[in-house]
């Protein structure tokens, strides 16, 4: 069985299921990558998700690192193509015909109905990361502090809070064996 | 339950097949998407957005770059592109780059815009990923990433709550959110089944209804 084809297949499936963006497809990503295929452990998944949070641009670029862990640089490329090209092609095609539906009342129904579904999926994505990332008082404190920062200090770039969380982890959790495989 | 299509509003009947036809469509706002923007400029613009958009809110960076700075789109066209990007699978950031690139220069524009917005982050995450692979059991790396993971939980919670509070409020919305969350997080039902059951149900709940108050001049019987 060819692992490269599996990588392409898994991420292509995730691509067309990613209604509502990256956070909404996180639980399914974890279920396939950690659960079904055993490509990563829980802790590796959390770590790689963390790497994806400290780089700029679209927030699911971590698929490159997951692919790299399976079959090296080719796996990284295939995960990237798989995750971004199918959904991109759908958007490209849809944007060319979308204007035809300008007056359709179903367009509004689609948006109105999908909005709460997407929020539910984002909440599920948060739960899926929390299950491995929240472990002990320090991590709870970091999560609450970052939540308050992002929620109330809207003018501050959220990436700064995420980086601060990493520094707090480095300062307080080194030597405790936190996250050790 | 098929309904007769409502009369197309102004401009909607114009073909949207090619950028030229769209630009020529009368009745649109006076704004026209510029033609002949060089591919390198599209690439450079999206590359810049891809390099500076730390923290997840790529849409805000896109609006600043494309609407305010380059003036390639007006607010209305930006929101219409965002509408498509959000309703369909995929990430807002990459879908937007493809849609806007396509509107500016067709398929080559879409390709360079997509490569531009992903290249900086992809390069950086690959460097970090390779370093991580050879330091996966370094206690300092682990401790830092545990902190980043915990911080990501706080950030995701805040973003989910902000989006939820802005868009939703009715009990029906809260019920749809709860059902989705329970199906995915508690019952571990595969996403494809969640989308195929909750999606159509939610769209049906918000299906278009004939509201007599909106068109009092129409005859009460629909002209089928």
Image (cartoon, coloured by chain):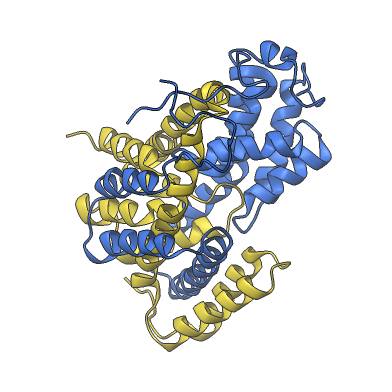
Chain colours: A yellow, B blue
The image quarter containing residue B26 is top right
- Residue B112, given in percent of the width and then of the height, sits at 63, 27
Q: Is residue A21 visible?
A: no
- Residue B186, given in percent of the width and then of the height, sits at 25, 66
B204 vs A87, nearest the viewer: B204
A177 vs A23, nearest the viewer: A23
In the rendered view, tell whether residue B43 sits above or below residue A168. above
Q: Is residue B71 shown left or right of residue B87?
A: right
- Residue A127, given in percent of the width and then of the height, sits at 37, 68
In the rendered view, tell whether residue A151 sits above or below residue B103. below
Q: Quadrant of the N terminus of chain A?
A: top left
Report the residue at 59% width, 55% height from top: B56
Q: Is residue A122 shown left or right of residue A180?
A: right
The image quarter containing residue B45 is top right
Which residue is farthest bottom?
A137
Which residue is farthest left?
A1
B212 vs A67, nearest the viewer: B212
Q: Is residue A129 visible?
A: yes
- Residue B176, given in percent of the width and then of the height, sits at 36, 59
Report the residue at 34% width, 71% height from top: A132
In the rendered view, tell whether residue B105 sits above or below residue B76. above
A22 vs B26, nearest the viewer: B26
In the rendered view, tell whether residue A178 sits above or below residue B75. below
Report the residue at 40% width, 53% height from top: A117
The image quarter containing residue B101 is top right
Q: Quadrant of the C terminus of chain A?
A: bottom left
**How many badges with numbers are in the image?**
0
């Amino acid at each position: 069985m060819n692992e490269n084809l599996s990588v392409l297949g898994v991420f292509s499936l995730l691509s067309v299921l990613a209604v509502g963006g990256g956070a909404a497809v996180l639980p399914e990503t974890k279920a396939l990558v950690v659960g079904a295929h055993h490509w990563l452990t829980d802790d590796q998944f959390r770590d790689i998700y963390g790497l994806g949070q400290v780089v700029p641009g679209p927030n699911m670029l971590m698929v490159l690192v997951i692919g790299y862990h399976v079959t090296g640089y080719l796996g990284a490329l295939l995960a990237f193509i798989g995750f971004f090209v199918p959904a991109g092609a759908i958007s490209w095609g849809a944007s060319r015909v979308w204007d035809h539906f300008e007056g359709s009342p179903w367009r509004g129904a689609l948006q109105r109905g999908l909005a709460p579904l997407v929020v539910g999926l984002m909440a599920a994505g948060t739960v899926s990361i929390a299950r491995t990332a929240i472990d002990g008082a320090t991590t709870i404190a970091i999560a609450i502090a970052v939540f308050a920062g992002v929620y109330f200090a809207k003018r501050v770039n959220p990436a700064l809070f995420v980086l601060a969380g990493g520094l707090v982890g480095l300062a307080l959790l080194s030597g405790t064996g936190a996250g050790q495989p | 339950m098929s309904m007769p299509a409502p009369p197309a509003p102004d401009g909607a009947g114009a073909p949207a097949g090619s950028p030229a036809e769209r630009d020529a469509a009368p009745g649109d706002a006076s704004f026209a998407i510029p033609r002949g923007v060089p591919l390198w400029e599209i690439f450079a613009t999206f590359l810049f957005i891809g390099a500076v958009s730390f923290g997840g809110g790529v849409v805000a960076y896109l609006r600043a770059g494309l609407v305010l700075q380059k003036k390639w789109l007006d607010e209305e066209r930006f929101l219409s592109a965002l509408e498509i990007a959000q309703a369909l699978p995929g990430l807002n950031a990459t879908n937007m780059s493809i849609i806007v690139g396509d509107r500016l220069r067709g398929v080559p524009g879409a390709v360079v815009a997509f490569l531009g917005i992903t290249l900086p982050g992809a390069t950086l995450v690959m460097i970090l990923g390779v370093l991580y692979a050879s330091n996966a059991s370094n206690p300092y790396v682990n401790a830092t990433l545990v902190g980043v993971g915990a911080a990501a939980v706080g950030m995701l919670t805040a973003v989910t709550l902000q989006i939820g509070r802005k868009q939703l409020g009715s009990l029906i919305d809260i019920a749809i959110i709860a059902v989705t969350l329970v199906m995915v997080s508690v019952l571990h039902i595969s996403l494809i089944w969640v989308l195929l059951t909750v999606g159509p149900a939610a769209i049906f709940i918000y299906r278009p209804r004939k509201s007599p108050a909106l068109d009092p001049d129409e005859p009460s019987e629909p002209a089928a």
